[in-house]
Image (tube, rainbow, N blue to C red):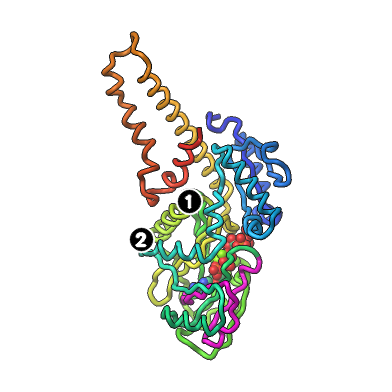
Amino acid sequence: MPSWRKGKHIGYCLNDKKKKKLNFQGFEDLCRKRGYEVTEIDLAKPLCEQGPFDVIIHKLSDLILESSYDSQSHQLIRDFQTYVETYSSIILLDPFPAVRLLLDRFESYRLLQDFQKQDSCIFSPPYVELNSGTGREAAARIREQGLTFPLICKTRVAHGPSSHEMALIFNEEGLGAVSAPCLLQSFVNHDAVLFKVFVVGSSHFVVRRPSLKNFPRGESARRSIFFNSHSVSKPESCSRLTELDEATLESPPPSDNVVCRAVRGLRSALGLSLFGVDLIVEKQTGRCAVIDVNAFPGYEGVPEFFSALLNHIETLLESYEQAARARVLVAEYSLHQRAPQVDSAPESTHGTDPRAPWMANSLETPKSAPAESGFFTFAVLPAVLSRH
Ligand SMILES: Nc1ncnc2c1ncn2[C@@H]1O[C@H](COP(=O)(O)OP(=O)(O)OP(=O)(O)O)[C@@H](O)[C@H]1O
Ligand SMILES: O=P(O)(O)O[C@H]1[C@H](OP(=O)(O)O)[C@@H](OP(=O)(O)O)[C@@H](O)[C@@H](O)[C@@H]1OP(=O)(O)O
Ligand SMILES: [Mg+2]
Ligand SMILES: [Mg+2]
């Protein structure tokens, strides 16, 4: 067994629905088979009695959201965060600030707008944010921004049952029913096919799903359509809204190159390991649009999920161990350099030690490297450097 695996402890914290849906017991079994200790974390008990942990996997989205208005949840999240900060060697999948960003569509769509400026391989449909106000104000904002109907209305909160309630709006009158805070996004015709990209560390998997059918562009007299996103884009979804009115050829998926660039860019911008990106291909132009980003999605249709997750964890553990070893070497080296020279190598040897420049550079990389330079620079090395 490699040294970085020895005695390692993985904790996880998922609600019953998530555990059941993922059949998470299968992951526990896989981890134990490879020699890991695995513990389901009980948030009602002090974390320090359940650890120490090397890795913690969680989907605490419910609790993070509740923590903004419920004092008990607030305390639980604070305790969790304090624990993880105190034991900075813990690899947390995923960090709270990045998860929090995805719980708020205003935040995540702003990030997508910025992202499309850097890489035009994808676009994010234009939208307006509505914090408050009436339909009339919404109409004014839409005209101001030059958005055209149809529009899709999404709640600001991106997680939880009510966050999946949406509306398709075809005219100004329909705006009367929107309730803020929400956003109104341009509807993009895409032949009723959605591509879900499920990301696990440096791997990703593309799964085809049903999606909303095409609608004529421009304002029309049609009544608004209210729907739940889970009734249109789940593998088993069977809705009139996903039945195309016209016969079309099966849409090809976006190119590997586009998907890879989008995933790499978003992973780096978000600093997340476990997330999903919903892509659609615009019918008129063939351009690829990102319409949704989800923290720790369902991975349905990805039989390799557990092995990919464990491989990712092992990659992180191994690089943490390597970085820790490098730090020890650096510390030893500098001690050695400061120590009085007695009878060891001649002084000049220290100055020309080939390890020295490499180690100095490697330690400076995280501070100077741009965030786009990849997941390891963004998410792993800073944590590695603060580990010991
Ligand atoms: N801008 C758009 N243009 C066309 N169709 C869209 C657009 N945005 C969303 N859709 C359709 O609406 C569905 C739900 O939208 P979205 O993915 O934003 O909702 P969600 O509730 O966050 O989904 P999830 O369950 O993946 O978190 C999509 O699967 C797609 O069919
Ligand atoms: O479990 P499911 O398969 O329904 O997973 C869904 C997940 O529900 P969860 O709460 O159980 O994780 C949803 O989370 P919340 O938005 O509600 O946070 C969201 O991420 C969907 O995108 C996932 O559907 P998918 O995109 O994978 O099809
Ligand atoms: Mg979605
Ligand atoms: Mg979503």
The residue labelled by disc 2 is 118
Cβ of disc 1 within 8 Å of ligand 2?
A: no
Residues drawn in magenta: 161-190
Is residue 210 shown to the viewer in this render? no
* View quadrant of ligand 4: bottom right
Residue 343 locus on image (x, y percent): 33, 8
Residue 97 locus on image (x, y percent): 53, 53
Mark 1 neighbour class, 10 Å CA radius: few under 14, some 14 to 19, many 20 or more: many
Front position in the image: 246 or 43: 43
Q: Residue 242: which disc?
A: none
Residue drawn at (58%, 79%), measured in percent from left and top? 178
Residue 166 colored magenta? yes
| Disc with the residue nearer the chain's start (1 vs 2) | 2
The residue labelled by disc 1 is 271
Residue 310 locus on image (x, y percent): 56, 43
Q: Is residue 161 above or below residue 71?
A: below
| Screen quadrant of the N terminus | top right
Whether residues under marks 1 and 2 lie with C-beta atoms below 8 angstroms apart, the answer is no
Q: Along the horizontal axis of the image, is 215 left or right of 69?
A: left
